[in-house]
Amino acid sequence: MAKILIIDDAKFTRTMLKKMINELGHEILEAADGREGLDTICNEQPDIVLCDIHMPEMDGMELLKILNETHTNVSVIVVSADIQDETREKCIDLGASEVINKPPDKEKLKAAIEKLLNKGKED
Amino acid sequence: MVTPTDRQLDALKKIVNTGMEKAAGTLNDMLGSHIELKAPSIVMFDPEKPGEEFSDLDNGELASVQRSFHGSFSGSSVLVFLPENAVKLVAALTDEKPGSEELEALMVDTLNEVGNILINTLIGTINNLLSAHIDFAQPNYREGKFHDLLKPLDSEKIEMFLLIRTNFKVEDPQVNGNIILIFELDSTRNLLSAIDKL
């Protein structure tokens, strides 16, 4: 069982993601913006972070930058409504493992999580 | 004064249609229901002289999610519902009963996120086709009369702008909605210039 942190200011999306991850049997942590998410990453060391981009306080891009600069060892899957090509490229450049569009497709999310967990085992 | 040519209008309608098809696809994924689309209408809109084309939205209070955007193009986008349709949509998405306290507590958050997803998908598709990029402000839920909702949040200036209206209809629950895109005058020139380069 992995520990997965969901960072999104929209309760609607957190609820949708929680339902999907519950079915996969993983432990779930939640945060409503990037700052709260960063604190949770430091305190709880999740295996995977599912992170929105556009959020108040600290957005997903800023969080990715901080994780990148501090060499924090956590895999981030960006889950965002922003489907612009440039946004996707920026997220990958900042170290995101995957970018999934909202509303998240359950099978795509499951495959992305399994890929990262398997990669973690190999490492 | 900017007047799009027939070729520009035709190309813009096709691009907006492509964006709306994708946005309808996301709503279909969320609701599991067929979404019917109407062809978009595109007009140079003068807020001082509103025409008849929005008379169906002009009769009372509306629920809306507004997002302004800046970048290759600047303007704002508004997802508009009649209030009873907004309630039906949130009830279908959250499995809460219309009129319940639980539903009331989820209304703004859920509509903001639906607006976020639909508007991003529509404008993101347009931008990808035109090799453009914009940044969005946070979504903002507002209730009011149609013409008040068209006023930008961050500006008092009222001038003529390019207005794109799209309309979608969810089959079950029966919900009508509109996404309205407003491009400021300078951005209208940039948009038409990007279309000319296609």
Image: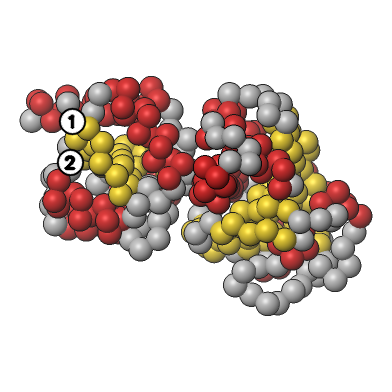
Q: Residues within 10 Å of mark 1 (few under 14, many from 20)?
A: some
Give the residue displayed 54% in from the left and 31% down from the top.
Answer: B95
What amino acid type should be assigned to the residue bearing mark 2?
A: Pro
- Quarter of the image for residue B173 reads top right
Residue B67, given in percent of the width and then of the height, sits at 58, 58
Q: Residue furthest left?
A: A123
Vertical placement of A67 versus B36: above or below? below
- In front of the other: A7 or B109: B109
Numbered disc 1: what chain?
A
Give the residue displayed 28% in from the left and 23% down from the top.
Answer: A24
Observer able to see residue A57: yes
**Residue assigned mark 2:** A46
Vertical placement of A39 versus B129: above or below? below
Residues at marks 1 and 2 on the same chain: yes
Callout 2 secondary element: loop
Tell me the distance, in whole angstroms, between the alpha carbons under discs 1 and 2: 8 Å
Vertical placement of B20 versus B33: above or below? below
In this rendering, position of residue A82 left or right of residue B160: left
Query: Which quadrant is home to the N terminus of chain A?
Result: top left
Tell me if label 1 and label 2 are in contact, CB under 8 Å. Answer: yes
In this rendering, position of residue B189 left or right of residue A85: right
Give the residue displayed 58% in from the left and 41% down from the top.
Answer: B100
Label placed on residue A2: 1
- Quarter of the image for residue A104 reads top left
Give the residue displayed 35% in from the left and 63% down from the top.
Answer: A57
